[in-house]
Image: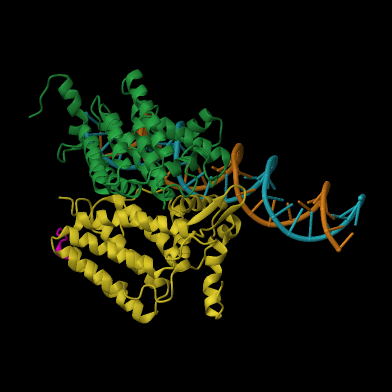
Chain colours: A green, B yellow, C cyan, D orange
Amino acid sequence: MSGDRKSSRTGKGRPAAGKGLRSQSVYRALHRAIIEQALRPGMKLPEDSIGEELGVSRTLVREALGRLAVEGLVELKPNKGASVSYPTLEEARDVFDVRRALERQVMQTLAGRLTAAQVALLEKHVGDEDVARAAGAEGPESIRLAGEFHVLLAEMTGNALLSRYVQELCSRCSLILALYGRPHSSECAVNEHRELIEALKGRDVEAAIRLMDHHLDAVTARAVLAPRTATELRDLLAPYALSEGLSPP
Amino acid sequence: MSGDRKSSRTGKGRPAAGKGLRSQSVYRALHRAIIEQALRPGMKLPEDSIGEELGVSRTLVREALGRLAVEGLVELKPNKGASVSYPTLEEARDVFDVRRALERQVMQTLAGRLTAAQVALLEKHVGDEDVARAAGAEGPESIRLAGEFHVLLAEMTGNALLSRYVQELCSRCSLILALYGRPHSSECAVNEHRELIEALKGRDVEAAIRLMDHHLDAVTARAVLAPRTATELRDLLAPYALSEGLSPP
DNA sequence: CATTATGCTATTGTATGCAACAGAGGAAGA
DNA sequence: TCTTCCTCTGTTGCATACAATAGCATAATG
């Protein structure tokens, strides 16, 4: 009953409910820049420079930064300005926990209710994922596409709010994977996405939910989220230690 | 393991991660005004007037409105300004669906892990709810307190993000209940909250989750969310028709 | 030499000014 | 009378200007 009640087309045409035209543009530009790691975590984001670079005033940059801060992609310290978020391991786990909860809801809503067109769209998307993985190895492009698959699913529920939240969470996950992800992190994700589609075709809701749980477990496991609470510096240096053949006691 | 890992005190001390000082004040003022229905749904919110009323410039009002828009409390149409959100029934259902998913996660995290202090805090809160219901009948105050109970629970998970989302959703639910709620809508909520606390004391996670599901079902049912998809005007006029003894064909 | 005081600079916080757009109301024409 | 166009007002979109704060370098002092 709720398979595609709104605009089911998951495409671009936003519901137009937004703010100023150019403000939105700045927001999107920064968003993409962060997700694709042109702007790396921790990097400072001065209003002046950005505005100058994008040809707009501080006002619009400020507005965009504010929104990005609400969504957790940038950190905004009073009188100290904005910087690209540098999520801690704790925050990373929080994000994944919430994401699991919401994606379960997605599966519950979608299982056994996908139209043929929707299935086709999803399959086309995993095709794109395959291409991206084959071509650009597993750069930011792969991470972005993997996230978009989940956003696509969420949008198909017809629940705009659910969709917005999943999108937000996927953005943050991109950041997190970029920070803590091991090389080859999105390696087998594509196959898992195919399995998800298969599960959704059937009517076994429980199975679909379990599969999504496993998928997200796998994604989490591929990141370095396994280590127990350790001081931030340790987390930061561990990869370098390993790559140099050093082993911390 | 994640019962109270951060600041466990659910009290006031915000993590200080915010923007300008006065901007925040404007935001909070408007937020409260909306939740407590001083500003009713659909009401226009001109930047000038509000700024004048609060003694600040349009800039800060604009910033606050932007944030409120992201959180779904105000609607922001380009070149037409802001107004208090007037959620449709569809949107209301969306909100409740997402809320259910997240509050399940809350129960799962919390069941059997509450400290004595946390239990005491929760019980004190339901006490306040009782007082409010007895005194002010069931005005906005009751609705606000009912929402705060759930926020309190979410904060006890130690998951800041989960907490933020639940807070956002509860705010929207306040709006929704104010719009579509029947009289006496929060009537038995207090007892249900007590039952939730009892369930959390035990270790039966499944039972706790089921109870929360039932509670939210009940809350939803108390609103007018039952009627099937109907034209907006109809929803709007139905209560008036009933109160006048008229029955639409 | 260490330490504290102090002015400078760079960046944010806030207010205001100007241009653009939407909508209401009236005037002109059919 | 009805329609159409136009002006006119109120409000937003965006840019700029000013005030305030943080951090740093430097200098003064024990």
The residue positioned 43% from the left and 32% from the top of the image is: A32
Residue closest to the far left: A249
Disc tally is 0
> Which is the main secondary structure of the residues drawn in magenta?
loop
Q: Quadrant of the C terminus of chain B?
A: bottom right
In this orientation, which residue lies closer to the viewer: A192 or A147? A192
The residue positioned 38% from the left and 35% from the top of the image is: A122
In this orientation, which residue lies closer to the viewer: A229 or A208? A208
Q: Is residue A17 left or right of residue B95?
A: right
Would you place residue B126 above or below residue B151 in this image? below
Q: Residue B49: which quarter of the image? A: bottom right
Q: Residue B130, image x and y in percent? A: 30, 77
Q: Is residue B243 visible?
A: yes
Q: Residue A210, image x and y in percent? A: 23, 44
Q: Is residue D23 left or right of residue A117?
A: left
Q: Residue B168, image x and y in percent? A: 38, 56
Q: Is residue A79 visible?
A: no
Would you place residue A65 above or below residue A139 in this image? below
Q: Which residues are magenta?
A: B111-117
The residue positioned 41% from the left and 42% from the top of the image is: A115
Would you place residue B155 above or below residue D14 in this image? below
Q: Residue B224: which quarter of the image? A: bottom left
Q: Residue A154, image x and y in percent? A: 38, 44
Q: Residue C24: which quarter of the image? A: bottom right
